[in-house]
Image: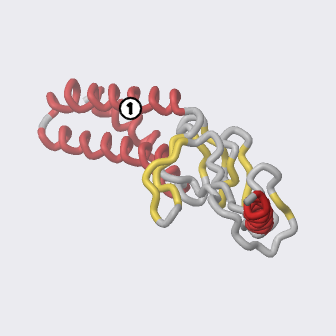
Amino acid sequence: MQELTSIRQSTDDDLNSTCQSIQMPVFKRHFGNNLTFFYIRGEPLITIGPHWPLTLCMIVSFGGASYLLIFEIALRKGLYVYYFSIFVAALQMISYLITALKNPGIVTSSREYKGILQCIVCNNSRELGSLYHCEDCDVCIQGFDHHCPWTGKCIGRGNINAFYVFVTMIPIYIVYFIIVSLL
């Protein structure tokens, strides 16, 4: 009986060592300091960057300024000014929210590149200039432009167009606010 038990244990040990030796390495997705929500085909759709308190302050500031513009100033100036103020304020807020929440281009898997560089933290191979590892977000970003603390995250391939609309809307919003206030 002891022989049968020892044979079974040695067979189990051999099987376990064989199984351990043929295990495939699993790539752990690296999102760094970002919170990720809502995935499409394994790619994060919505991410919140490491500077989220400043993002929250900006949302509250835009919301307060929009309330002041729409309900305290524009409502007294007439219906057309009121509706156009809603349009300007909504465009400003929506462009900011898209910039602040959309995935900036976080590289989530080790894709095959013909490059010679490799990110030490994310373990991504990359062509020269195609990816950049952001120290604040602690992820590699495709089409990296810069890290923007006002939006709380990086600006990259995924949110650069919304960022351009947001930056264009800032002076338009300020000038419109001043003009409506002075009318």
Report the side of 161 relative to 11 (left or right). left
Report the side of 155 relative to 36 (left or right). right
Q: What amino acid type should be assigned to the residue bearing mark 1? A: Phe
Which image quadrant is residue 175 in? top left
Which residue is pictured at 41% across the width and 42% down the height? 172
The answer to whether residue 125 shows anywhere in this view is no
Residue 37: x, y in percent? Answer: 46, 48
Residue 94: x, y in percent? Answer: 37, 46
User: Which residue, as the protein is rendered here, is positioned at the far right?
Assistant: 116
Looking at the rendered image, the quarter that the N terminus falls into is bottom right
Which residue is pictured at 70% across the width and 43% down the height? 138
User: Which residue, as the protein is rendered here, is positioned at the far front?
Assistant: 1
Looking at the rendered image, the quarter that the C terminus falls into is top left
- For mark 1, give the secondary structure: helix
Q: Which residue is mark 1?
A: 62
**Residue 158 drawn above or below residue 49:** below
Q: Residues within 10 Å of mark 1 (few under 14, many from 20)?
A: some
User: Which residue, as the protein is rendered here, is positioned at the far left?
Assistant: 79
Which residue is pictured at 62% across the width and 59% down the height? 108
**Residue 22 drawn above or below residue 155:** below
Colour mapping: secondary structure
| Count of numbered labels shown in the rendering | 1
The answer to whether residue 98 shows anywhere in this view is yes
Residue 160: x, y in percent? Answer: 55, 55
Viewer-closest of 88 and 61: 61
Which residue is pictured at 65% across the width and 63% down the height? 109
Viewer-closest of 135 and 177: 135
Residue 29: x, y in percent? Answer: 63, 55
Report the side of 178 relative to 133 (left or right). left
